[in-house]
Amino acid sequence: MQPDCVVVDAMGGDYAPAAIVRGALKAHDEGLSVALVGDPERIRSLVGDSHIPVLAAPQVVDPSLGALPALRASPRSSLRIALEAVRDGRAAAAFSCGSSGAVLLESMRTLGALPGVARPAICVAIPRVDQRPLLLLDAGASVDCRAEHLVGFAQLGAAWARAHGADRPAVGLLSNGEESRKGNDAIRAAAVRLAASPLRFVGQVEPHRALAGACDVLVADGLLGNVMLKSLEAAVDLVTSNLDQIAPPAAEALRERLGWRRRGAASLLGVRGIVLVGHGRSDAQAVVAAIRVAARAVRSDATRALRRALAEP
Amino acid sequence: MQPDCVVVDAMGGDYAPAAIVRGALKAHDEGLSVALVGDPERIRSLVGDSHIPVLAAPQVVDPSLGALPALRASPRSSLRIALEAVRDGRAAAAFSCGSSGAVLLESMRTLGALPGVARPAICVAIPRVDQRPLLLLDAGASVDCRAEHLVGFAQLGAAWARAHGADRPAVGLLSNGEESRKGNDAIRAAAVRLAASPLRFVGQVEPHRALAGACDVLVADGLLGNVMLKSLEAAVDLVTSNLDQIAPPAAEALRERLGWRRRGAASLLGVRGIVLVGHGRSDAQAVVAAIRVAARAVRSDATRALRRALAEP
């Protein structure tokens, strides 16, 4: 196992371990540095004679439990052992398709938060109409958020955008309308605080305006952000499946451009290390895409860049 | 003005009154019974020599205010006068593209709620993968909802589905996951109550499974429901605009099948009369589609059918 490797939780996700292992093998074949964590016998039977490193983990996070009870029940889970490898410098990034709540909690426990970060968030890059990325966070880690959490997510998202070269990224709050009285109490209170902050805050933003380019960073609690993300994905799936009957090559081109399976993974921002969260429904293709994203984050030393951007005024 | 007519608030919406009047004129040309309410001079200058009836309203609901202050500031608004025409039996349905919160409040005040309905909801029919409608409510009238409101929306939506011929419609709660612990406190509490109700409750449902057919009625607070609806619309717009570059006829076919401008309007369920709410961005085409939906609701005596379905066990 190389210290620049992406350690993959083979046991998390609807199609684990088979789809996860297949994806990791593909990434390995592409020359990416990858390791797998989980039940060693099941993994070895799936990897065949590939020389991909395998870390043994005796337990699995039970997805039928809530995050906290599940982590209590499995202190030596594949997720935990993957995160410990990152913490101890034996790996450079961790990736899991398990429950995002469990990944959040276990990452906080194992890696800890970056300075100044009260609550990490899951950040996903969505292609806007102008093909530039819209960073949506939180995409599903924390359902219940107060205004201070939303403000924290805005700071995290803006720092992440700056760490990726954006100059004064525009920050919006996901809402059901654009006026300052729109949204729930937490959204309205966060809007007041963000308007008084050094961030370039553009107010409450609706989904269509966000995709049209009204902001670079779109902030929401994990319930609202997750429903927006999954609605976009569901609509793209619905449209491309309708299009399959009319113009199959166009459907395939659109899937390539907009489908979530090619996007890779979401980043857990705000913890001390690179952690990526995949779709529960990830297939091998989605896993490869995610590992590519993780490898890029490793090469660009993404956590250090985020930390530096967070420290900027 | 005929008693079976759809009375259209000419002054509500981003492109009012021009786009609204153009849409009403088209519907009138199709032989539908329509009347317009608003500033009589502006409307007459737009309708030309058409014989469409015009009701004068001296005031307009100010969209820059919240619903309650806006209604207080305009007791003789075009919205109010349209709803009074329905209340007094001079018209059979009202349609407005103004603020949905204002339409909800003014409808409650002018028409009142149906027996047993604590809070009306905006219900929109979304095409599922199998081309059958998914009823989503609340799509934006009430941002802050407790469990009891979500249960009420479930009863309303199920009754509306039965009134349209569905047998034991499946009801789901929009959430960020499918397990019973998913969602916020209101969603989880509503799930417990719905599981014990006579409704066919299928639990928490994510957007993609709802569109795939997991339920006929999808219940959410107005913030979550609105963000889902607008995300779906934004994604369809994004995909079809991408597709314009690849396969323009396919893009047009998809817009025809899935775009919100052809869908018509959303129904305000639970008030004593037929009230439809249009998109703020409605153009003339969307207005015609909405008036057609309203006319169909009038012909089928939709409010009476809903009332009867609500009274069923």
Image: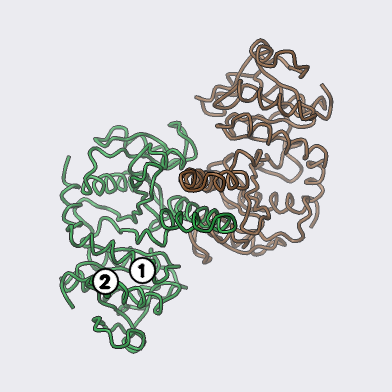
Chain colours: A green, B brown
Residue that appears at 43% across and 68% down: A66
Q: Position of residue B234 (x, y in %)?
A: 49, 44
Q: Do marks 2 and 1 share a chain?
A: yes
Q: Do the residues bearing badges 2 and 1 touch, measured as CB atoms within 8 Å?
A: no
Q: Quadrant location of residue B166?
A: bottom right
Considering the numbered disc 1 on the image, is that residue within a helix, a strand or a loop? helix
Helix or strand or loop: what does disc 2 sit on?
loop
Vertical order, A150 against B217 (above or below): above
Quadrant location, the C terminus of chain A:
top left
Residue A178 in sight here:
yes
The CA span between labels 2 and 1 is 13 Å
Three-letter amino acid code of the residue under disc 1: Val
Which residue was labeled with disc 2?
Answer: A30
Tell me which label, 2 or 1, sits earlier in the chain. 2
Instruction: Please state which amino acid type lies under the numbered disc 2.
Output: Glu
Where's residue B97, x and y in %? 61, 30
What residue is disc 1 on?
Answer: A287
> In x, y percent, where is residue B265?
65, 38
The 10 Å Cα crowd at callout 1, few under 14, some 14 to 19, many 20 or more, is many
Residue under the image location 70 percent in, 42 percent down? B269
Q: Nearer the viewer, residue A18 or B200?
A: A18
Residue closest to the eye, B174 or A38:
A38
In-image side of B127 versus A262 (left or right)? right
Q: Residue at x 31, y 63 (%)?
A: A276
Residue A182 percent across, percent down from the top left:
47, 35
- Say which quadrant the N terminus of chain A sits in: bottom left
